[in-house]
Image (cartoon, rainbow, N blue to C red):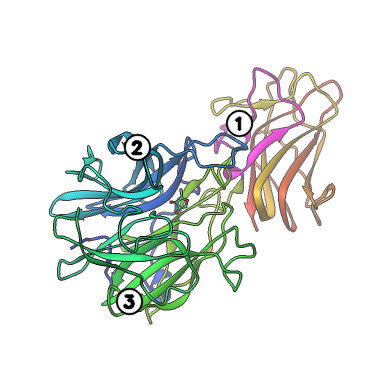
Amino acid sequence: MSGRKVLAAAAVVTTAIAALATPAHAANPIITAIYTADPAPLVVGNTMYIYAGRDEAPTGSSNFLMREWHVLSSTDAATWTDNGAKATIATFGWAGADAWAGEVEPRNGRYYWYTSVNGNGPGWMNIGVAVGDSPLGPFTDAKGGPLISDSTANSAGLNIDPTVFVDDDGQAYLYWGGYWSPRAVKLAANMIDTVGAVVTPQGLTNYWEAPWMFKRSGLYYLMYAANDTNGCVTDSAYACQRYATATNPLGPWTQRGIVLGQVSSTTNHAGIVDFNGQSYLVYHTADAPGGGTFRRSVAVDKLFFNADGTIQRVTPTTGGGDGNLATSATASTSYVSSWESLAAINNGGVPANSADRSNLAYGNWPQQGTQWVEYTWPTARSISRTATYWFDDDQGIDLPASCQVQYWNGSAYVPVPNQSSCGVAGNTENVTTFGPVSTTRLRLSITSRTGLSTGVLEWKAYQA
Ligand code: FUB
């Protein structure tokens, strides 16, 4: 039986117990060195693994470019390691492109990695299966051909997004399907053959793609991406995560509500897992610097069940666990000296003093007068506080004469409302508070002292 897909109700905190639990909180997105998507969590021992595709599409692209799957891991759900690509399109000799969503299911000491991949011939997407002897592999093709393809009777409109669940009696089930067509079939004990007919599960209202199945307290749960505008999304190019429950693994299902609303990427793909006594929702967004619908990043947030088994809707967090949204913003500036770095301002560095360059420094020498640094987010953020640590190299860069926090109101940059003084002290964080603004762009306007330039070591922007 899978330790992942059968959630222990006693270990899954309810609202009342949640107040006592203080498990670690991830800084979202959890990995920003590469773009990652379609996360599927798995807990083995004291480690949470996340199996995710890698988005390699260049900026401005309007297509996926996905050639490999990475495995991320953590022992505290807060600090994450990218263990690298553990499967690629080349893992499947019969495949040619599109390393789309996958999921790993353990059985009998082996780890079966079900993937969406483009068959290199007739038809488009297929479900493949690789196998390894550890959560990190190595993984090899378990079957030598697709488990599900367009030639499978009653297959989906698009054969993608597998989720596999092993019930208490040892029977395994595969769910999958895109283009509004969920499908399910039993798997043989060898985990690489189907048994019986492919069925069309009933009751998955507004199903679009990306199923995720698990069992808790004897009840079967199926979370899935939907894209209706009836409470799910404001634009059907986007998706939310709805969930349904059933008393039989093959349904019929009853739609129960929304787990996660529309995110900043058009696609919405998620998994649920229990880890160290806390439930987590693992999903993706376009929130990383430079991110987009084809440049997504995995995020992790706590999830809570109510006492009656229903799921509380998750409010996605961005930035660090302290609410600093700067780490998920794209920074820009009016000017940066070639030997200094704009990356300094939102790299999370903790300066020892205003001359401390150990976490990089932003400076605009030889510019004088008013310059600016700015943060941009793909969707609006609600912000009510900033904290600025100024750079002062005791040469051409000095503390500013004054500063002002501004935001883009849709047509112009204007001062944030009711701004407390914009401090210019050295060797400390200068906190500025203001009435909450909802904006995609926040700007720090900096005016130098006569004959000098200005610099910043860290500029934080806090969620309201
Ligand atoms: O990443 C490619 C596809 O986008 C996945 O298979 C879908 O679930 C959607 O996230």
Magenta stretch: give its range.
Answer: 326-352
Residue 338 percent location from the top left of the image: 67, 18
Compared across the picture, whether 41 is left or right of 61 comes to left
Q: Amino acid at mark 3?
A: Gly
Report crowding for label 2: few under 14, some 14 to 19, many 20 or more residues within 10 A (C-alpha): many
Q: Quadrant of the N terminus?
A: bottom left
**Which quarter of the figure has residue 331?**
top right
Answer with mark 1 or mark 2, whichever residue precedes in sequence: 2
Q: Which residue is mark 1?
A: 343
Residue at 59% x, 42% y: name it.
62
Compared across the picture, whether 446 is left or right of 341 comes to right
Answer with mark 1 or mark 3, whichever residue precedes in sequence: 3
Total number of numbered labels? 3
Secondary structure beneath label 1 = helix
Measure the C-alpha gap from mark 1 to mark 2: 34 Å
Q: Is mark 2 within 8 Å of ligand 1?
A: no
Q: Which residue is mark 2?
A: 89
Measure the C-alpha gap from mark 2 to mark 3: 33 Å
Q: Which residue is mark 3?
A: 251
Residue at 54% x, 61% y: name it.
239
Residue 50 visible to the viewer: yes
Secondary structure beneath label 3 = loop
Answer with mark 2 or mark 3, whichever residue precedes in sequence: 2
Would you say the residues marked 1 and 2 are in contact, meaning their CB atoms lie under 8 Å apart? no
**Which quarter of the figure has residue 458?**
top right
Compared across the picture, whether 157 is left or right of 277 comes to right
Q: Amino acid at mark 2?
A: Ile
Q: Amino acid at mark 1?
A: Ala
Secondary structure beneath label 2 = helix
Residue at 81% x, 57% y: name it.
418
